């Protein structure tokens, strides 16, 4: 159509859709996937600023974080699975016999593109977003009955956070690494910049993801220094010659405190990291993404427009439920010397496996 703007006529493309999802990250992808499974003819549109769904990430979760039916529909997207995993600390090491799983973004993109690709606008940035429309930088106007914001975490004055920041490299070795299972935390390394550990996932007999992870008070990542530390760790393990085939970095919010009712958008549903819908202490986001995908799809199947309210109710309930975790986080960051933070995790991983599993799945009760 043609619109008059500042005295100049400009050609603007208008698009209409039932559901607009801003951002094509994990939560958006799982929601879109769930919609296509249950409501194949439902009209929706994802706007993603990059050329690929999910960016460049590996998302992991414990098998006990979701229920059996959720695991079943999520299963086709899982890239790697293990039956157990290790943790290593200066005074305590342990194999935890609980399942662990990873979704690689490159795999998710390849698997989902044939299914939801026709519903995605790639390489498009959103200039402005309201509860009824999105204005793109190229001038496109998208009108929608329902708008969901999934454009990732951004700092907010109403929420106090610290960070779990990481730099990781995926390597391919010339010889087998002989690692039998993931090492979720190797905190035997030199402690610096808060609680530091190396996170290692064996993708096959010669491929590994090795990440330097830190529970830090700041978001800054010294990539050169982290890379040096990762390479030192690889040498210490005797993994020999290798080539780097991928590199990833990120910073997950560790939620300390805040006023969530002021933070939450009153008119637009926020999912994923945009709504701080992750485990407050670990940053794991798949359980929330799975539950919201089911909740929203169920609401859409009723042909109602109460989706925003349902998301808000879910988010507020989760915030209230996680009060205990935010207390733990404040103890970790505010009542503990940064280089002594590892001692809390070292003590935690000496607890019974069932209690550790409940911590990760956010299931607890006070006696």
Image (spheres, grey):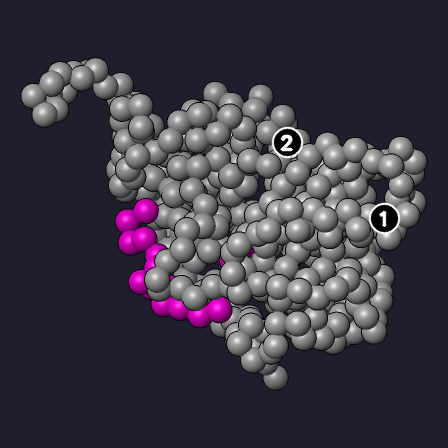
The disc label shown at residue 106, or none: 2
Gap between marks 1 and 2 measured at Cα: 28 Å
x and y, in percent, of residue 92 in the image: 83, 71
Secondary structure beneath label 2 = helix
Q: Nearer the viewer, residue 246 or 223?
A: 223
Secondary structure beneath label 1 = helix
Q: Is residue 261 magenta?
A: yes
Residue 320: image quadrant is bottom left
- Residue placed at 31% from the left, 23% from the top? 138
Q: Going from the N terminus, do you reach mark 1 or mark 2 first?
A: 2
Q: Nearer the viewer, residue 16 or 243?
A: 243
Determine whether, in the image, residue 68 is placed left or right of residue 137.
right
Label 1 belongs to which residue? Answer: 235
- Range of magenta residues: 252-268
- Residue placed at 84% from the left, 65% from the top? 94
Q: Is residue 83 magenta?
A: no
Determine whether, in the image, residue 141 is placed left or right of residue 29.
left
Determine whether, in the image, residue 259 is placed left or right of residue 198.
left
The disc label shown at residue 153, or none: none
Crowdedness near tag 1: few (<14), some (14–19) or many (≥20) residues, C-alpha within 10 Å: few
x and y, in percent, of residue 358 in the image: 67, 66
The quadrant of the image that shows the C terminus is bottom right
Above-or-below relation of 77 to 190: above
Q: Nearer the viewer, residue 136 or 18?
A: 136
């Amino acid at each position: 159509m043609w619109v008059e703007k500042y005295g100049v006529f400009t050609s603007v493309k208008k698009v209409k859709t039932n559901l607009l999802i801003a951002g094509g990250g994990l939560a958006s992808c799982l929601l879109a996937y769930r919609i296509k499974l249950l409501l194949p003819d439902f009209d929706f549109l994802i706007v993603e600023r990059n050329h690929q769904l999910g960016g460049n990430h590996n998302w992991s979760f414990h098998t006990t974080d979701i229920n059996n039916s959720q695991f079943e529909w999520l299963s086709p997207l899982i890239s790697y699975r293990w039956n157990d995993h290790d943790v290593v600390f200066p005074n305590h090491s342990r194999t935890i016999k609980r399942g662990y799983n990873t979704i690689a973004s490159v795999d998710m993109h390849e698997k989902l593109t044939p299914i939801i690709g026709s519903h995605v606008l790639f390489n498009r940035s959103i200039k402005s977003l309201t509860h009824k429309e999105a204005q793109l930088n190229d001038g496109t106007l998208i009108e929608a009955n329902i708008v969901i914001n999934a454009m990732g975490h951004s700092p907010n004055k109403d929420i106090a956070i610290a960070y779990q920041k990481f730099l990781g490299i995926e390597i391919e070795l010339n010889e087998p690494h002989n690692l039998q299972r993931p090492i979720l935390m190797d905190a035997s390394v030199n402690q610096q910049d808060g609680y530091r550990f190396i996170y290692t996932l064996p993708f096959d007999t010669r491929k590994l993801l090795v990440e330097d992870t830190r529970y830090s008070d700041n978001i800054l990542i010294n990539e050169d220094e982290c890379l040096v530390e990762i390479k030192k760790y690889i040498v210490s393990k005797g993994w020999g010659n290798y080539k780097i085939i991928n590199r990833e970095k990120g910073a997950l919010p560790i939620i300390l405190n805040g006023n969530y009712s002021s933070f939450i958008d009153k008119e637009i549903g926020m999912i994923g990291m945009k709504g701080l819908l992750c485990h407050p202490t670990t940053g794991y986001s798949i359980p929330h993404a799975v539950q919201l995908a089911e909740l929203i799809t169920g609401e859409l199947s009723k042909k109602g427009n109460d989706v925003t309210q349902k998301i808000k109710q879910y988010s507020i309930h989760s915030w209230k439920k996680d009060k205990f975790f935010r207390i733990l986080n404040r103890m970790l960051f505010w009542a503990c010397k940064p280089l002594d933070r590892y001692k809390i995790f070292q003590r935690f991983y000496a607890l019974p496996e069932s209690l550790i599993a409940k911590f990760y799945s956010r299931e607890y009760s006070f006696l």
